[in-house]
Amino acid sequence: MKQKISSYEAQPEKVNKVLLLFSGGLDTSCMIKWIEQKYDAEVITLTVDVGQPGIDLKATKQKALKLGAKKAFIVDAKKEFAQEYIAKAIKLNALYQGEYPLSTAIARPLKAKHAVKIAEQENVDAIAHGSTGKGNDQVRFDISITTLDPKMKIIAPVREWSMGRDEELKFAKKHGIPLPTNKGEYSTDENIWGKSSECGILEHPQESPPEDVFQFVTIPEKAPDKSEIVEIEFEKGIPIKLNGKLYELHKLVQKLNLIGGKHAVGIIDHMEDRVVGLKSREVYECPAATILLKAHKDLEKFTSTIHQNKVKPLIDQKWGEMAYYGLWFDPLMKSLESFADKMNEAVSGKVKVKLYKGKATVVGRESKNALYDLNLATYDKKQTFNQLASPGFIELFGLQTKLINQIQGGLDG
Ligand code: ARG
């Protein structure tokens, strides 16, 4: 066993019972056996349903039990994920480095919360998760779990086992773990807010992602030739209706994933700065997130003052960064959310978004709280804006710029 430096890492001799966050994939399946052997401990599993498309929860539970888990818990957290996590991400226009809607990042504290709850109820000594030692997810899990339960110990087998893929496949075969049907080229993570893909050819940033990466979205070349307009209605910053029909947020997001995905909306390919310092190429499919974030930002701008609109991106940027860094339970998050909540009290109205071959474009918006005033803005005769007051304003607004140019004789000469 490798040397452990942190106080929260589980020591094998002190561990008798472990709760494993189980996805049902190859890694976490091997972990059931690996923990049993290396830690000589009993394993129970938890699978949190955050809307991973195609997941068969019954089969996942059966698989865990068959591989030796003493109990296998399943928690349906789709509604909670939408209401407590996605709703915040929308109000805070959350995009890490301006591109990534944080789909994986915001699901981690939710999984940590459920894991800690069951771990305490079941009296386990440690929580195990499937993250590697190179990514952000280990940071998010370890910080969230040990913040919620400072006594809890953690096991991250991939950080410890140093098995390559071939060895892992051998280990799986030896222990009767079903081998994956795909070639396992990509490492993925899915929920209703989006899908992340890494590894394989994607590790070569100069190569464009092959079509087989995409599961949530059609590629633009195969998207319909006809555009589609969706109308989203927001109440206080939260989407409540899609095309005039009321939906609970998780259902609205799922529905919009299908519509947006069909039009190839939400493909994101960017170079990302991980918390641990690595730069990595990430490919995401986030149709609903892309559409809702665009629509929300547009409506927020429409209903807020120029001064609010200047400060809000600073709040948004900080919130997104904290969520990305795994600091969900830091009180700063609540402070930033209070700011966003207050400002979003006015963010009610409808936004029309056109979807066409990979693009989502806002093409209309309306709100009873809009600060737009047609009588002020129009170039029609009936306009009410006092144009005669403009020169007085301009004289004072440009004062310092004029002065410095006179004093210094012009900035470029
Ligand atoms: N880079 C993203 C993040 O840190 C996604 C990581 C998800 N993991 C994966 N195996 N694709 O949030």
Image: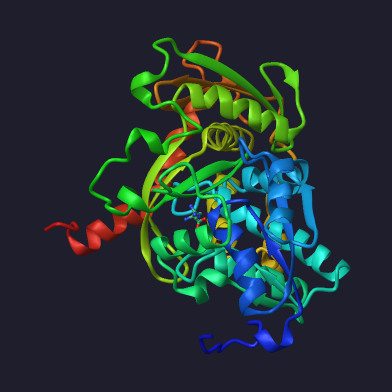
Give the quarter of the image for residue 192.
Answer: top right
Q: Is 158 located above or below residue 198 in the figure?
A: below
Residue at figure coordinates x 48%, y 33% from the top left: 215
Residue 382, position as x, y percentages in the image: 56, 11
Q: Is 157 located above or below residue 299 in the figure?
A: below
Q: Is 10 located above or below residue 404 in the figure?
A: below
The residue at the far left in this view is 413
Residue 226, position as x, y percentages in the image: 43, 10
Using the rendered image of the protein, determine whether residue 54 is visible from the camera's viewpoint. yes
Residue 380, position as x, y percentages in the image: 49, 11
Q: Is 263 located above or below residue 148 in the figure?
A: above
Give the quarter of the image for residue 113.
Answer: bottom right
Residue at figure coordinates x 43%, y 35% from the top left: 214
Residue at figure coordinates x 19%, y 58% from the top left: 411
Image label count: 0
Using the rendered image of the protein, determine whether residue 327 is visible from the camera's viewpoint. no
Q: Is residue 111 left or right of residue 405?
A: right
